[in-house]
Image: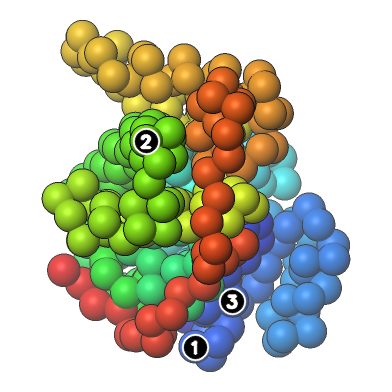
Amino acid sequence: MKIGFIGLGNVGGKLAESLLRNKFDIIVRDLDSNITKKFSGQGAQVTNSPKDLAKKADLIITCLPSPEICSKVMESEDGIIKGLSKNKIWLEMSTTDSAEVKRIGSLVKATGAIPLDGPVSGGCHRAATGNIAILVGGDKNAFNKILPALSAMGRKILHTGELGSASVLKVITNYLASVNLVSIGEALIVAKKTGMDLKIAYEAIKISSGNSFVHETESQVILNGSYNISFTMELVLKDMGLFNDLSIKNNIPLELSPLVLKIFKDGQKKYGRRAWSSMIVKRLEDACNINLRAEGFPAELNDSEPEEKGHQI
């Protein structure tokens, strides 16, 4: 199976490297020629045309920053759809709008190809080691066909149902992570203001009922002061907006979601759209004129678990 991969950013690049590391035959496309040059040096074929990539590949993967960019890559005159044909598979691995996945999916189906959505969850450090989780929606036979490639990119792989279901679940998980991040900032500020040692506070939360994946990861780079989680305020606002849109579309009177969305909008205004998302806690640091620092925490996260072949759950 020849795999085409478009979008070699923070997450996409690491997923594509996992495919290369596991000896898959891949062809890549990215706007940054320095990135594609690096992949070429590692044995990947490079093309400057999404259409050409789609013609040459059996599985076409997109991992792009926004639904708008994905639409352009898919639907332009030189886009992926123009290069699709019967039995090829398109796997959308971006975090995107489920309705947009279904809309583009119908265009993909019209060519005889098969659409799947397959967003990932677990952070860039786990994408780098092939230990990230992958949610996949769409035709089960197509899912089974590409399972070897999914198992190279991720550790836990879940088929979620019809096309678009994985995108809904991904937006839900990102919403929960964003709410958790805001609450962690408040918890650490209270610990600091009451005189607690923040290293002890981190460990106490880690072994308690208040623990979470977000605490175990993002709290570390917050306490270091780098805030480097390889995920930006801009991306949080995109994902939170998608979640909020789902609630409005389904007439759900949410309370936390609009508030957290407002908090991140203020964070982006203060620190910029490219600021790391974990800098949201800096709003409280600045307001209280303190910093959340402790010795012994890393500036960047690294996955300490060995790479493990993925499996369906």
Camera-nearest residue between 70 and 64: 64
The CA distance from mark 1 to mark 2 is: 50 Å
Residue for point 71% across, 61% down:
29
Vertical arrangement, residue 243 with respect to residue 149, above or below:
above
Which residue is tagged 1?
A: 22
Residue 289, numbered circle: none
Which residue is tagged 2?
A: 194
Camera-nearest residue between 277 and 18: 277
Q: Say which amino acid is labelled 2.
A: Thr
The CA distance from mark 3 to mark 1 is: 8 Å
Nearer the camera: disc 3 or disc 2: 2
Whole-percent x and y of residue 67?
Answer: 54, 34
Classify residue 40 by image quadrant: bottom right
In the image, 43: left or right of 130? right
Q: From this viewpoint, which residue is outermost toward the bottom?
A: 23
Crowdedness of circle 2 by 10 Å Cα count: few (<14), some, many (20+)?
few
Vertical arrangement, residue 198 with respect to residue 245, above or below:
below
Classify residue 77 by image quadrant: top right
Which residue is tagged 3?
A: 17
Whole-percent x and y of residue 190?
Answer: 37, 33
Camera-nearest residue between 141 and 256: 256
Nearer the camera: disc 1 or disc 2: 2
Residue for point 48% across, 57% down:
220
Camera-nearest residue between 211 and 155: 211
Whole-percent x and y of residue 105?
Answer: 40, 41
| Element type where label 2 sits in the image | loop
